[in-house]
């Protein structure tokens, strides 16, 4: 059974898209397609409606906040293809504790196969995908930190320039 993307319309305008966890039992027998990994983003704003993160441009999602902490939930081997029963509850519990990026790594299509060793091989692909995402996050975070540092420097220098006369005047009186 496949549950597709849920689209909600209001006044004939698209408002949001919820991406469900994959429920594909037939992949345990038939194998999988090339791209079997999905990154599902949850935040307090969309706690019950996952947003699909792009592998190439994960920061294009307006809900992804690099300033917030990120937590990854990754399931293991799924012999029947059913979603982990704990997944939704974990997402909700994490978001109750604090606002963060909860990224569910849905690799159900790669974790469901009667050939367990094929699944083991797929874990390396999932790990490579996550490594790439985390490295992108680190690069983007350093870039944003550099911008913030530059803005702070410019703010301090602006303040100093505006107040230089007062400081000099005060120093001369002492």
Image (cartoon, rainbow, N blue to C red):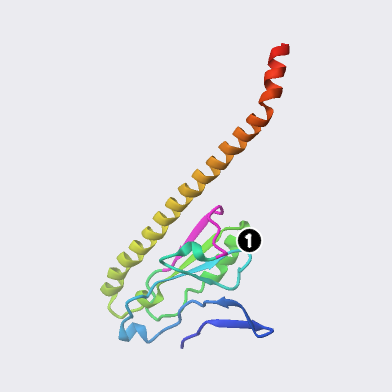
Q: Is residue 10 above or below residue 125?
A: below
Choose between 30 and 141: the one closer to the eye.
141
Q: Residue at x 62, y 82 (%)?
A: 8
Query: Within 10 Å of the Cα at label 1, are there few (<14), some (14-19), or many (20+) other Cα atoms?
Result: few
Mark 1 highlights which residue?
Answer: 96
Determine the image quadrant of residue 79. Answer: bottom left
Q: Quadrant of the C terminus?
A: top right
Quadrant of the rendered image containing residue 172: top right
Residue 60 vs 138, above or below: the answer is below
Residue 167 quadrant: top right
User: What stretch of residues is rendered in magenta?
Assistant: 62-75
Q: Is residue 102 left or right of residue 156?
A: left
Is residue 144 magenta-colored? no
Residue ID at (42%, 83%): 24
Secondary element type, mark 1: helix
Most prominent secondary structure in the magenta stretch? loop
Q: How many marks?
A: 1
Q: Residue at x 62, y 64 (%)?
A: 44
List x then y, in percent, for residue 25.
40, 85
């Amino acid at each position: 059974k496949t549950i597709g993307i849920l689209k909600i319309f209001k006044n004939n305008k698209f408002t949001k898209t919820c991406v469900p966890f994959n429920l594909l039992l037939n992949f345990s027998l038939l194998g999988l397609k090339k791209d079997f990994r999905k990154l599902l983003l949850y935040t307090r704003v969309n706690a019950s409606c996952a947003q699909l993160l792009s592998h190439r441009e994960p920061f294009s999602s307006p809900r992804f906040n690099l300033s917030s902490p990120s937590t990854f939930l990754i399931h293991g081997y799924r012999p029947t293809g059913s979603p982990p029963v704990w997944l939704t509850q974990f997402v909700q519990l994490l978001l109750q504790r604090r606002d963060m990026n909860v990224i569910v790594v849905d690799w159900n299509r790669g974790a469901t196969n009667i050939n367990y060793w094929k699944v083991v091989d797929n874990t390396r692909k999932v790990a490579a995908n996550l490594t790439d995402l985390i490295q992108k996050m680190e690069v983007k975070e350093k870039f944003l930190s550099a911008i913030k540092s530059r803005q702070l420097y410019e703010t301090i220098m602006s303040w100093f320039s505006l107040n230089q006369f007062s400081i000099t005047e005060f120093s001369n009186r002492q």
